[in-house]
């Protein structure tokens, strides 16, 4: 290749790279429908449910912006089903009624919590026998889950297994580390905070927190 040709190709490649970068930066992530107050409420309600269990090794949850982004991407598809990604746990809820956002979020979390009545049933969350009676609740109170991030989307048309719903709400929460692991108990019954992990030396309302917690964790 001649020197002249090289001088032409290099600026051209640089221009193409710049255009590609601009296109990437121009892409915006789906809106999660969450504000700071709603995020704090979701964490507080989850931790209240976790406190009620009276477990000896229950970690306090904190908000994850990363999981919020993942949840937002999923609900933006308006396809009401579990993504079933092994990287994180997932709870989902839909509402066909147009209500205040806070009401939808509260009702969704309350519906997951109601599944606690099935916890005494053997294999209430077991993929082998296709049982999902308590999977949402079990994920909510999975002791070793540390992070939660959620998203809410009003879908013009929400696809579900049985039908399509017009102007329905899709609410999803993602969790890490994931729960509902086969053969593992969701939590250990006992005196609250008696079996906190080594680095979790703070106890607040029966939940374990690390010594270097972020503001808002307690």
Image (tube, rainbow, N blue to C red):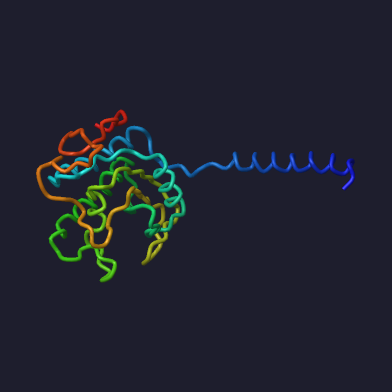
Percent x, y of residue 91 = 31, 53
Indicate the position of residue 127 as horizontal and vertical percent values: 29, 67
- Please tell me which residue lies in front, 23 or 5: 5
Q: In the picture, residue 204 is in which quadrant?
A: top left
Q: Residue furthest front?
A: 198
Q: Is residue 125 above or below residue 6?
A: below
Tell me the quarter of the image containing the C terminus. Answer: top left
> Where does residue 18 sit, x and y in percent of width and height?
69, 39
48 to the left or right of 4: left
* Residue appearing at x 38%, y 65% in the figure: 163
> Who's the residue at 20% across and 56% down the image?
185
Identity of the residue drawn at 46% across and 54% down:
77
Say which quarter of the image contains residue 146.
top left
The residue positioned 28% from the left and 39% from the top of the image is 43
In the image, residue 113 above or below residue 200: below
Location of residue 61 in the rendering, given as x and y in whole percent from the top left corner:
27, 40
Q: Residue furthest top?
A: 215
184 sits to left or right of 168 = left
Q: Seen from this angle, which residue lies furthest bottom? A: 129
> Is residue 18 found left or right of 122 in the rendered image?
right
**What number of labels is visible?**
0
């Amino acid at each position: 290749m001649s020197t002249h040709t090289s001088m032409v190709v290099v600026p051209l490649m640089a221009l193409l790279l710049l255009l590609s970068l601009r296109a990437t930066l121009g892409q915006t992530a789906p809106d999660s429908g969450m504000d700071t107050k709603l995020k704090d409420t979701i964490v507080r309600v989850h931790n209240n449910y976790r406190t009620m269990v009276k477990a000896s090794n229950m970690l306090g949850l904190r908000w994850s912006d990363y999981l919020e982004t993942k949840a937002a991407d999923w609900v933006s598809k308006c396809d009401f089903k579990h993504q079933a990604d092994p990287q994180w746990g997932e709870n989902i809820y839909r509402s066909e009624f147009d209500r205040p956002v806070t009401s939808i979020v509260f009702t969704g979390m309350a519906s997951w919590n109601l599944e606690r009545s099935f916890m005494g049933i053997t294999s209430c969350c077991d993929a082998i026998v296709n049982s999902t009676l308590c999977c949402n609740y079990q994920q909510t109170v999975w002791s070793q889950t540390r992070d939660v991030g959620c998203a809410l989307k009003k879908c013009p048309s929400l696809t579900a297994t049985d039908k399509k719903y017009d102007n329905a709400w899709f609410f999803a929460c993602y969790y890490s580390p994931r729960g509902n692991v086969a053969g593992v108990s969701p939590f250990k019954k006992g005196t609250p905070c008696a079996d906190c992990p080594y680095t979790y030396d703070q106890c607040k309302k029966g939940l374990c927190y690390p010594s270097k917690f972020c503001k808002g964790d307690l």
